[in-house]
Image (cartoon, rainbow, N blue to C red):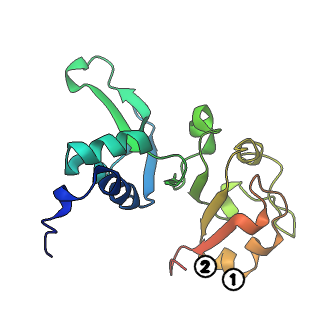
Amino acid sequence: FSTFHPFPRLPCELRLQIWEHAVEPRTIEVRYRAYKPERLLCTNPVPAIMEACREARDVGLKLYEKAFLDSIPGRPDLGERYIWLNWDFDVISIGRTRLEKFLPVKTLIQRLKLERNRNDGFWDDSADYTLGREDENPELRSFINVREIYIVMDSFDMMYGLRSTVETWPCGADNVVFIDGASGE
């Protein structure tokens, strides 16, 4: 790994473009902690652009915003907690966390990843396993700005074609990707 020493001598406009192109989409793992105090947790690191240098951070501040703002009640000494997020291209991965925990930001999420299987109540229990009409599904349909959905499923559900019968998605069926939880494919 080497350093490009002439970088500071490049024209400012070119350096700023390089910083912008250095930003890559991330998968942001957000989970709900049910015990007191209830909160959303994330262990993703701060985007590198926010820590590289002042010039890079200035670019990063235009691309990212603080999301999932949180503070611990009774502990002001710990300060405010948040995630740096770019709603346009970061994937919000919620695992098995219920969609209802994300309703306050449902119109901001554009890329959503969740882990569900046949026994979660996410799918209708009818023989064709279409997207269910109860439980979480009205909530999923309310994520009206979602452009991509990634669903991690167990191998059994993948093998029996649960994924192939989905009809209605807020982003359209062509933008739904099913991932086998065992293989990651």
Q: Image check: 184 left or right of 110?
A: left
Q: Residues within 10 Å of mark 1 (few under 14, many from 20)?
A: few
Percent across and percent down for residue 69 are 41, 30
Residue drawn where x is 71% and y is 47% of the image: 140
Q: Are marks 1 and 2 in contact (CB under 8 Å)?
A: yes
Residue drawn where x is 35% and y is 61% of the image: 22
Kind of element beneath mark 1: helix
Percent across and percent down for residue 64 are 42, 42
In the picture of the structure, the residue carrying the numbered disc 1 is: 159
For residue 44, say whether it is visible.
no
Q: Residues within 10 Å of mark 2 (few under 14, many from 20)?
A: some
Indicate the quadrant where residue 144 lies.
Answer: top right
Kind of element beneath mark 2: helix
* Mark identifier at residue 155: 2
Percent across and percent down for residue 174 are 76, 68
Q: Image check: 10 left or right of 72?
A: left
Indicate the quadrant where residue 152 lies.
Answer: bottom right
Amino acid residing under circle 1: Met
Q: In 3D space, how far apart are the residues under numbered discs 1 and 2 (Cα atoms)?
A: 6 Å
Q: Image check: 61 left or right of 91?
A: left
Q: Image check: 78 left or right of 35?
A: left
139 over 173 or under it: above or below: above
Residue drawn where x is 13% and y is 74% of the image: 2
For residue 160, say whether it is visible.
yes
Front-most of 34 and 63? 63
Which quarter of the figure is the C terminus placed in? bottom right
Amino acid residing under circle 2: Ser
67 over 147 or under it: above or below: above
